[in-house]
Amino acid sequence: MKRVKEQREQNDAAPVPAGDTPPALAGDSPPVLEIDGLGIRLPGDRAGRPILDGVGLRVRPGESVGLVGESGSGKSVACRSVLGLLPAGARTSGEVRVAGRDVLTMSRPELAGLRARQVAMVFQDPRASVNPLRRVGDFLTEGLRASGTPAAAADARALDLLDAVGIRDPRGALRRRPHEFSGGMLQRVVIAAALAAEPALIVADEPTTALDVTTQAEIVALLARLRAERGTGLLFVTHDLELAATVCDRVYVMYAGRIVETRGTDELFDRPRHPYTAGLLACTPSVEAGAPPPRPIPGRPVSLAEAPPGCAFAARCAHAVPRCSEEKPALTRHGDGLAACHRADEGIMS
């Protein structure tokens, strides 16, 4: 935990008081993103339970919010819903509001405007985000030109963006193609493209997974700096709790399509209230002297074909009691955050 706090300071992401909404960010500024009761179901008999079940979260201007969980927990589906990118034929409930407007009710032209101006997405693999046959300059300026920006102004804007994300020789970079960049440098280019329209929100879906540790640290520091300088909201999706701690003010933990815990980052690390959160922390390797070896979470995640009647984590939980397998716990306030656990106030996860 000491190393995580030091990294947060290096990233200029100062710790905030624990809670569902950091007081320093609350003020009079409305959230740039509000998800309320979001449910997503596949059509017919393709799944035994919803992909997402009553998901709710908030991101305010200048705030970095983490969404963490194992593969299959639903976090990528949740973040893609912000852009209206839903599974084919999916049935939805709840609301996904960006700047007060519900994305789930938008028409195709309205969604195109949302993606072009208000919300930008940084995907896991930068090479999947660009056309390998086109020059980087075309990739960066096509959106600007489509919105009516003159060619010379678009080129100047692209140069400024490449410089902002730490690309050396920005003018030369405009003439190069994607295969001439390393993975880390290309991810910087993709981040520059995300910033082109000055979006109110950036959604980063595991943007460092394909990068080496050194480049990962550089990208994390870059996102933190740009967020602080521009006041952009950031939804950072990852399976790595420790990585989320270096970036985020608050963290939402997701399991089997539900939010099972949320609170300020430091509070989450110091005193998790849900056994799944405690399990994620316990299985994270540490380089600190005397730290215990990582302990894997037993069992396997619940598949979409399974719909357990009680808590979805009960079969893997060392603290489960009969009630856990019979009654689904509600997400309720415990301490300075929220947790969906019948035993959250007993202190057994610390």
Image (tube, helix red, strand yellow):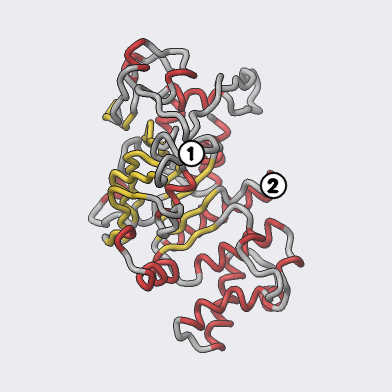
Q: Residue at x 56, y 48 (%)?
A: 206
The disc at residue 68 is 1
Q: Nearer the viewer, mark 1 or mark 2?
A: 1
Amino acid identity at mark 1: Val
Q: Is residue 350 above or below residue 85?
A: above
Q: Is residue 22 left or right of residue 178?
A: left
Q: Is residue 254 above or below residue 178?
A: above
Amino acid identity at mark 2: Thr
Image quarter of residue 187:
bottom right
Distance between mark 1 and mark 2 Cα atoms: 21 Å
State the residue in front, 100 or 219. Answer: 100
Quadrant location of the C terminus in the rendered image: top left
Residue 181 can be seen, yes or no: yes
Label 2 sits on residue? 214
Question: Mark 1 Cα within 10 Å, few/some/many (few <14, many 20+)?
Answer: many
SS of the residue at dot 1?
strand
SS of the residue at dot 2?
helix
Q: Position of residue 132 (x, y in %)?
A: 70, 69
Residue at the extreme left: 28
State the residue in front, 346 or 266. Answer: 346
Q: Is residue 279 left or right of residue 290?
A: left
The disc at residue 189 is none
Q: Residue at x 48, y 37 (%)?
A: 73
Total labels drawn: 2
Residue at the extreme right: 180
Q: Which is nearer the N-term, disc 1 or disc 2? A: 1
Residue at the extreme front: 44
Q: Residue at x 34, y 44 (%)?
A: 39
